[in-house]
Image (cartoon, helix red, strand yellow):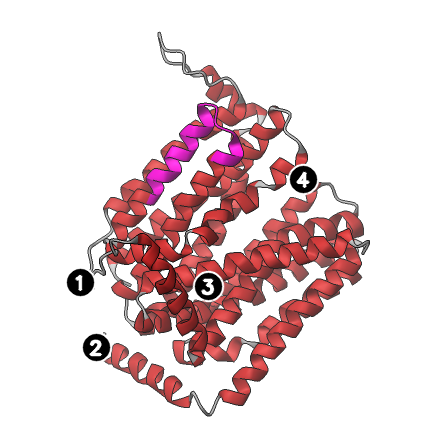
Amino acid sequence: MKRGFFTIMSAQFFSSLADNALFVAAVQLLRGGGAPTWQQAALVPMFALFYVVLAPFVGAFADALPKGRVMLLSNSIKVVGCLMMLFGTHPLMAYAVVGLGAAAYSPAKYGILTELLPASQLVKANGWIEGLTISSIILGVLLGGQLVGPKISAHLLAFDLPLIDTGINTPPEAAICVLIFVYLLAAWFNTRIPLTDFPLRPMPRNFLGLLPDFWHCNVRLWRDRLGQISLSTTTLFWGVSGNLRYIVLAWAAAALGYSVTQASALVGVVAIGTAVGAVAASLRMRLEHATNVMPLGIGMGLLVILLNFIDNVWVAAPFLVLLGGLGGFLVVPMNALLQHRGHNLMGSGRSIAVQNFNEQACILGLGGFYSLSTGLGLSAFGAITVFGVVVAGFMWVIKRWHERNCIEHSAEVEYLLDIARNDDMHS
């Protein structure tokens, strides 16, 4: 790997670490202010809001500037969101601003991989990026919980500046102050990301003109044979993963009688499995074999259903590691294939913006479907069963479509083989 890749990894780790720790601090800030429970739950969709709304614009923005500069500006927006929380803006609004920064950050962090690395290294790069991101999710939740806890928050609140009233009087406010410095550390790494020789694509003067351009990119990626396969698979995976934490919480309460605090540890177990699967895929899979992992998506849906038959935590823990591991092994090669196709078809930033739009829309859609199932009177076990059947069914349809068209797109697969071989020869 080139040296700049490790700089990108460091920037991504600290930025994602702060994102997840900030979520815990924002929840505690709402609870301390007596906000209703629905507002705490609304933090997740508020964070995802700008991924969907700004999808037509952030991809073009990422392609118009050096990716490192885009990541620096995005982290600056996150810092603004933190300051808004500290100075009295409603946490939902402030967290949405942080989500705005994350939405702009994502096309740049993935797009620069296709500019910096050859195609033969994309699977490995995605494995490390995904594994590191998932690790930052686990550590970020733990960090946020410790920062708002009584021990560390007492030390933070005891620190004061002479002759200056900072107005920081609660544990979540003190935690947010610490996280601002974590974002600034990520921003420093952003300044160290090397420039690439890939040509920039200027933003059009009329921003509304990006809407038909985004729609064209969306349609073009969905109509491309390999693009359709990889986009549908990654969209479904992230739709499942985005809602899996709610499913695990509901299952743990119904099957094990766990509280939210106890159940959240099991959510971390799934994330650990995903990280292991992602790293394993980066070591074993190659770009030209990416479509071979599609049956794992069907397995994920079936494993979700099997959760209903587990009522022992010692069985549940390795089972959830397996569930997460299948997902990690599935998404890494598919993500690399999607990046490669999108990079060739329309530019890396635009293709990842299309990917983010579809994935976040799937998170919202599957979440609404699961909520509707429970709202119609289904028990947690019944809703989980329906959810798993839908996921496995959609993945089976995608796999069947691939099998029927595998002869037609054999030329594209051979094209990827040639690229990977040439990259290996040059490196």
* Residue 426 tag number: 2
Residue 91: in sight, yes or no? yes
Between circles 1 and 3, the one closer to the viewer is: 1
Question: Which comes sooner in the sequence, label 3 or label 2?
Answer: 3
Percent across and percent down for residue 425 are: 24, 80
Secondary element under disc 4, as helix, strand or loop, is helix
Q: Is residue 42 above or below residue 245?
A: above
Q: Position of residue 14 (x, y in %)?
A: 39, 44
Amino acid of disc 4: Thr
Left or right for 28, reference 81 = right
Which one is closest to the eye, mark 1 or mark 4? 1
The residues tagged by marks 3 and 2 sit, at their Cα atoms, a distance apart of 25 Å
Is disc 1 surrounded by few (<14), some (14 to 19) or many (20+) residues within 10 Å? few
* Mark closer to the chain start, 1 or 3: 1
Give the farthest residue toward the top. 163
Of the two numbered discs 1 and 4 on the same chain, state the one appearing first in sequence. 1
**Frontmost residue, 204 versus 391:** 204
Residue that mark 1 sits on: 197
Q: Which residue is mark 3?
A: 279
- Residues drawn in magenta: 74-93
Q: Which residue is mark 4?
A: 261
The three-letter amino acid code for the residue at tag 2 is His
Which amino acid type is shown beneath numbered disc 1? Asp
